[in-house]
Amino acid sequence: MPADATPRLLLAEDDTELRCLLARALRRSGFHVTELRDGRETLSLLVHCATQAPEQLPHLLISDVRMPGCTGLEVLAQLRRVHAGLPVILITSFGDEATHEEARRLGAAQVIDKPFDVDELCAAAWTLVPCS
């Protein structure tokens, strides 16, 4: 990524208030944020970018685990078929060990249980963005 480029982040969260709060914080932190409401919308955009517009691929995906249409785990599993290297942070209110284990198996960089500190999420996101 060029030094002057703003890193692109996809934020998939079905809770409108939380999505807006997180998007504001991530934008203030320096990301270009595309907000998505559900798993199908997220997967559709990722597949489109990977196959039709690779220059628009995000640098990072942050996704809720439980969303309508397609869960964050299902998005992650499908994503690995079209873009294996995209870092993913999953956020969840239902962070049992089985969910964490499945997320790790599918290649999630991190799973963060709700409630969490928004500044910590921003810091975690920056650790996963490629520097060059």
Image (cartoon, helix red, strand yellow):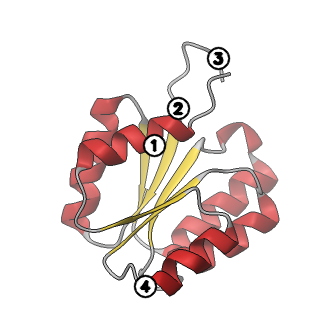
- Find residue 86 and report its horizontal and vertical position in percent: 67, 51
Earlier in the chain: of badge 4 and badge 1, it is 4
Q: Residue at 45% x, 76% y: name it.
A: 65
- Find residue 105 and report its horizontal and vertical position in percent: 68, 73
- Image quarter of the C terminus: top right
| Of the two numbered discs 4 and 1 in the rendering, the one whose residue sits closer to the viewer | 1
Q: Which residue is mark 2?
A: 7
Mark 2 residue crowding within 10 angstroms, few (<14) / some (14–19) / many (20+): some
Q: Which residue is mark 4?
A: 68
Name the image quarter holding residue 131. Answer: top right
Q: Is residue 34 visible?
A: yes
- Find residue 76 and report its horizontal and vertical position in percent: 63, 69
Q: Residue at 60% x, 79% y: name it.
A: 102
The kind of residue tagged 3 is Pro
Earlier in the chain: of badge 4 and badge 3, it is 3
Q: Residue at 53% x, 70% y: name it.
A: 41
Q: Which residue is mark 1?
A: 125
